Image: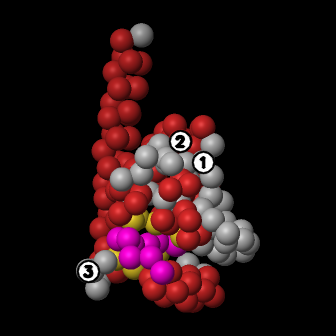
Amino acid sequence: MNKIILTRAVKKLNTLITMYTGLITVGVDNWRGYRFIFDTKDVRSCNNNCSTCPLYKLLKNEKAGYFSPTLYSASKVDKKMFGPQNKLNCKTLQQYKNCYISFLTEQTKTYKEIKQELKLIKNFTIIYSKGNTDLRRLEYKFRKDIMQESLRRLRGKKNNLCNRQRES
């Protein structure tokens, strides 16, 4: 992860922590641009009524740029693939893990696409986790879970494909 971005992210996070108490886990990634991924109490009880969400209210006037804590809108395609929230970066850590797994196992078709996705996974950085002081271990588990589940799913697809070819 870009060290300048991480420095900006931690600085902004320290400001957000003083204004918002619902943070559970916060990560930074570079998918569609550098951005925060927010796992919060509000995300976990999200009903897609953003105008009443305390996190949305806090961040709605943030300007998008090279890096900012703004919330990015999800398209219908995004929601189908990555989950029901109106904002792409409002995801529990488990939901975000599932986003990577789904994309790796269902969308990537070439070596180059797989390599790009693995780079995103490698560079995802957790900068805050309530009650957890070993963020590197949490990141390691996050990545390990993605790889294990992706391989499990791909093995099943390979077996199904082989069985279908034998039956033809």
Q: Which of marks 1 and 3 is nearer the N terminus?
A: 1
Quadrant position of residue 137: bottom left
> In the current view of this chain or complex, which residue is farthest to the front?
52
> Looking at the picture, which amino acid does disc 1 mark?
Ala
| Residue marked by disc 3 | 131
Q: Distance between the residues labelled 2 and 1?
A: 6 Å
- Residue found 55% across the figure and 63% down from its top: 56
Depicted 15 relative to depicted 65: above or below: below
| Magenta span of residues | 19-30
Q: In this view, does 50 lie above or below 26?
A: above
Q: Residue 112's x, y, as percent?
A: 62, 54
Q: Residues within 10 Å of mark 2 (few under 14, many from 20)?
A: some
Residue situated furthest left in the rendering: 131
- Tag 1 residue: 74
Q: Which of 31 and 104 is in front in this view?
A: 31
Residue 159 is left or right of residue 19, and the answer is left
Query: Quick check: marks 1 and 3 in contact, CB under 8 Å?
Result: no
Residue 118 appears in the picture as rendered: no
Give the residue type at disc 2.
Lys
